[in-house]
């Protein structure tokens, strides 16, 4: 019986004295709302709005995180919740309703590419992946 030796391209033993110097960066999901419609009451296009807080309130009220100064939008119209890297949209009892892809909702999961409507305003929802946890040296 002959012996066969397999040459491995990497060491088979772990050197206990070596240290790990690089870590894999973590990916964080960021929600993004981009204006689709902008009636005359909102003269300038709203910049893409980043959803990063665990709760983002949207409405006409000046205390909202995203203020939409349009009469078709309620003072506290809706909120976006971020839980376990997922995005959820909840209507807060608005007068003109909240829709996702033309379907009226009270509560809905948001996915990249969804069309979100609040009153007469419409937004595309997208998810961006952002790296975090990298050492800056």
Image: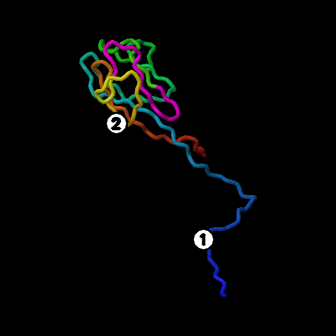
Q: Mark number for residue 9?
A: 1
Q: Secondary structure at mark 1?
A: loop
Q: How many marks?
A: 2
Q: Mark number for residue 114?
A: none
Q: CA distance from mark 1 to mark 2?
A: 44 Å
Q: Nearer the viewer, residue 95 or 133?
A: 95
Q: Residues within 10 Å of mark 2 (few under 14, many from 20)?
A: few
The quarter in which the N terminus is drawn is bottom right
Return the x and y of residue 47 as percentages of the image width and height. 36, 28
In magenta stretch: residue 18: no
Residue reaching furthest right? 17
26 over 8 or under it: above or below: above
Identify the residue position indicated by label 2 in the image: 113
What range of the chain is rendered magenta? 81-98
Return the x and y of residue 2 as percentages of the image width and height. 66, 87
Return the x and y of residue 84 as percentages of the image width and height. 53, 34
Residue displayed at 58% across by 41% down = 133
Choose top left, top right, bottom left or bottom right for residue 121.
Answer: top left
In magenta stretch: residue 87: yes
Q: Nearer the viewer, residue 108 or 125?
A: 108
137 over 114 or under it: above or below: below
Q: Secondary structure at mark 2?
A: loop
Residue displayed at 51% across by 30% down = 83
Residue displayed at 39% across by 14% down = 93
Residue displayed at 33% across by 18% down = 97
């Amino acid at each position: 019986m002959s012996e066969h030796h397999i040459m491995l391209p990497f060491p088979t033993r772990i050197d206990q004295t070596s240290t790990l110097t690089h870590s894999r960066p973590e990916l964080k999901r960021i929600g993004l709302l981009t204006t689709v419609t902008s009636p005359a009451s909102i003269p300038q296009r709203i910049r893409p709005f980043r959803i990063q807080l665990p709760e983002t309130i949207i409405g006409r009220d000046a205390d909202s995180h995203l203020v939409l100064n349009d009469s078709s939008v309620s003072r506290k119209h809706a909120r976006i919740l971020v839980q376990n890297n997922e995005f959820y949209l909840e209507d807060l009892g608005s007068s003109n309703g909240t829709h996702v892809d033309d379907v009226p909702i009270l509560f809905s999961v948001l996915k990249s590419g969804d069309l979100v409507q609040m009153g007469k305003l419409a937004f595309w929802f997208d998810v961006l992946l952002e790296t975090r946890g990298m050492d800056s040296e």
